[in-house]
């Protein structure tokens, strides 16, 4: 497995993974479904998207945002057949390392009990500090 900065030529494969990730929550409209793909395209252009590759194929990606001395993990999707194999862990660690290189001293991620990803974050040393709430207007 190789972790690298996402490139414009990766966008097709990233989009396929993003669509697959959104399909998981299609029946649960109360759950955030990954935002607009434009967010991911912008992250690739600005160098704040990382991809995992196996044999040259994109098998996962993560997007992070730098906000002063804080980084926010906004998207993490791993190809269905590779989940549980360390890809997500490697992406989260790599995003944290890159954010620290740019001056971040704290990293936060958005998760909720229904998606199961909080276990991955806890495995890498993150602490659950709360959940984000909101309302449709």
Image (cartoon, rainbow, N blue to C red):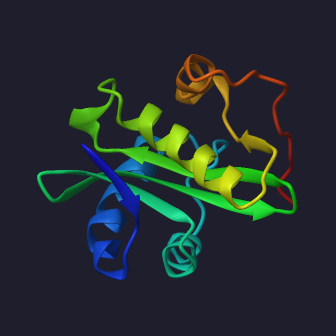
Q: Residue at x 49, y 74 (%)?
A: 44
Quick one: quadrant of the N terminus?
A: top left
Judge left or right: residue 115 versus residue 129: left
Question: Which quadrant of the view contains residue 102?
Answer: bottom right
Task: Classify residue 38 as left or right of residue 11.
Answer: right
Horizontal side of 39 relative to 89 (left or right) equals: right
Q: Where 56 falls versus 110 (above or below)?
A: below
Where does residue 80 sit, x and y in percent of width and height?
A: 27, 38
For the residue pair 67 and 15, the one nearer the viewer reads as: 67
Residue found at the far left of this picture: 55
Does 20 sit above or below residue 130? Answer: below
Residue 38 at least partly seen: yes
Q: Foreground residue, 49 or 135?
A: 49
Residue 18 appears in the rendering: no
Give x and y (percent) for residue 120. Answer: 53, 24
Residue 55, x across and y down, in percent: 11, 52
The image quadrant where one finds the C terminus is bottom right
Q: Name the residue located 75 percent from the left edge and 21 percent from the top edge.
A: 127
Q: Residue 14 at x, y = what percent?
A: 35, 64
* Image mark count: 0
Depth order, front residue of 54/24: 54
Q: Residue at x 59, y 72 (%)?
A: 39
């Amino acid at each position: 497995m190789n972790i690298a900065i996402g490139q414009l030529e990766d966008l097709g494969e990233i989009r396929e993974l993003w669509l697959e990730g959104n399909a998981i929550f299609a029946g649960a409209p109360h759950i955030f479904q990954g935002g607009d793909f434009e967010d991911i395209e912008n992250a690739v252009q600005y160098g704040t998207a990382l991809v995992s590759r196996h044999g040259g194929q994109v098998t996962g990606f993560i997007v992070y945002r730098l906000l002063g001395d804080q980084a926010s993990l906004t998207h993490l999707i791993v190809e269905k057949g590779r989940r549980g194999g360390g890809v997500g862990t490697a992406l989260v660690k790599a995003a944290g390392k890159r954010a620290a290189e740019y001056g971040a001293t704290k990293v936060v991620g958005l998760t909720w009990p229904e998606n199961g990803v909080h276990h991955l974050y806890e495995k890498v040393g993150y602490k659950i500090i709360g959940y984000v709430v909101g309302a449709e207007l």
